[in-house]
């Protein structure tokens, strides 16, 4: 296969699932759960279509249960929050070491699209911000991460 034929395949697969930049909510906090990577598929997210967030993490102790608390902001305004049972998003009990948390959700068709916005040559992307806290069964915060998400401008079937 020639290099020219491989390039389009790489471009297609790079938009299907892509790791996103993740930050801890508190820079100097010593979280018991360390997040290695967050993958979003598809990326950008398509309105009205399922999106899956897969979080690769590691822990130094077993976790028997808990909650995931998710907060979403749009241009700094709180627009959505939800809480999920940790054991519905991963296999419990979580053993010491590496584990995955996976959550799938369909964004409504009316969700405003946001991808990279350019002002005077500089780029500001990710007007949607997501914060996720993982709490154990005693409500102790195990980790807190935040990252930006992009919503594609492709209309869903529901919009047509």
Image (cartoon, grey):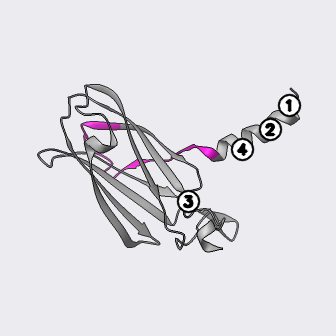
Find residue 139 and report its horizontal and vertical position in percent.
Answer: 14, 49
Q: Secondary structure at mark 3?
A: loop
Question: What residue is shown with label 3?
Answer: 150
Q: Can residue 29 be seen?
A: no
Q: Residue at x 36, y 68 (%)?
A: 80
Question: What residue is shown with label 1?
Answer: 3
Find residue 144 and report its horizontal and vertical position in percent.
Answer: 30, 49
Q: Which numbered disc covers residue 12? A: 4
Cα separation, mark 3 vs mark 4, equals 17 Å
When the figure is inspected, residue 15 is found, relative to residue 129, above or below; the finding is above
Q: Can you tell which of label 3 and label 4 is closer to the viewer?
A: 4
> What is the span of residues highlighted in magenta in the rendered image?
16-34
Which quadrant of the structure image shows residue 64?
A: top left
Q: Nearer the viewer, residue 82 or 77?
A: 82
When the figure is inspected, residue 126 is found, relative to residue 64, above or below; the finding is below
Cα separation, mark 2 vs mark 4, equals 9 Å
């Amino acid at each position: 296969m020639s290099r020219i034929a491989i390039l389009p395949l790489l471009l297609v697969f790079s938009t299907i699932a892509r790791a996103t930049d993740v930050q801890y909510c508190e820079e100097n906090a010593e979280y018991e759960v360390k997040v290695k990577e967050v993958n979003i598929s598809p990326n950008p997210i398509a309105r009205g279509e399922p999106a899956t967030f897969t979080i690769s993490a590691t822990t130094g102790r077993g976790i028997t249960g808990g909650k995931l608390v998710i907060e979403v902001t749009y241009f700094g305004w709180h627009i959505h929050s939800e809480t999920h049972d940790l054991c519905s998003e991963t296999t419990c009990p979580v053993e010491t070491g590496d584990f995955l948390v996976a959550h799938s959700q369909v964004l409504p068709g009316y969700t405003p699209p946001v991808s990279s916005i350019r002002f005077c040559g500089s780029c500001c992307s990710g007007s949607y911000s997501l914060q996720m806290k993982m709490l154990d069964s005693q409500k102790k915060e195990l980790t807190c991460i935040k990252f930006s998400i992009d919503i594609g401008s492709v209309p869903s079937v529901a919009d047509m």
